[in-house]
């Protein structure tokens, strides 16, 4: 039986395109979990259980911003979290970053966005 999850919209490196990531970088990658009229990301996402990277199972969470912000100018507050770049498992040729986690009521969530791996 397939696992049911909520598909969430994410924006890797909000405000930039393409979403270039250097896997050797010692910094973090910002990932915004976007709210919709039916999904309040800051209120519904369990910010302690997020994983992000090549497969979405990488334990790479550094921290989540304490305050929500509207990163895509749609009038809804979004949740921005940061992931340790070197823990994301990205390799040259990867084209997608995957975020996984759960809501505060334990429903799995998953989101995907494009990435461009650079050295």
Image (cartoon, grey):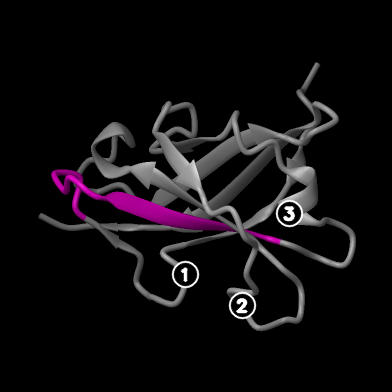
Mark 3 neighbour density, 10 Å: few (under 14) some (14–19) many (20 or more): many
Q: Position of residue 1 (x, y in %)?
A: 81, 16
Measure how far apart labels 3 and 2 are at the Cα level.
13 Å
Residue range in magenta is 22-34
The residue most toward the right is 38
Measure how far apart labels 3 and 1 are at the Cα level.
15 Å
Q: Is residue 28 left or right of residue 92?
A: right
Mark 1 neighbour density, 10 Å: few (under 14) some (14–19) many (20 or more): some
The residue most toward the top is 1
Indicate the secondary structure of the residue bearing disc 1.
Answer: loop
Mark 2 neighbour density, 10 Å: few (under 14) some (14–19) many (20 or more): some
Q: Position of residue 118 (x, y in %)?
A: 16, 58
Q: State yes or no: residue 23 in magenta.
A: yes
Mark 3 highlights which residue? 41
Q: Is residue 95 above or below residue 35?
A: above
Q: State yes or no: residue 86 in magenta.
A: no
Mark 1 highlights which residue? 14
Give me the disc on residue 75.
none
First-in-chain label (3 vs 2): 3
User: Which sits in the foreground, 101 or 68?
Assistant: 68
Mark 2 highlights which residue? 72
Indicate the secondary structure of the residue bearing disc 2.
Answer: loop
């Amino acid at each position: 039986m397939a696992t049911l999850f909520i598909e969430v919209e994410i924006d890797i490196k909000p405000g930039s395109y393409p979403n270039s990531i250097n896997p050797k970088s010692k910094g973090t990658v910002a990932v915004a979990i976007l709210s919709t009229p039916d999904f309040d990301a800051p209120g519904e996402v369990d910010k302690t259980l997020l994983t992000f990277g090549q497969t979405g199972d990488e334990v790479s969470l550094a921290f989540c911003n304490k305050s929500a912000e509207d990163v895509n100018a749609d009038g809804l507050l979004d949740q921005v979290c940061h992931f340790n770049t070197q823990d994301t498992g990205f390799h040259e040729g990867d084209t997608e970053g995957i975020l996984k986690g759960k809501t505060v009521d334990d429903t799995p969530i998953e989101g995907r966005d494009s990435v461009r791996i650079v050295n």
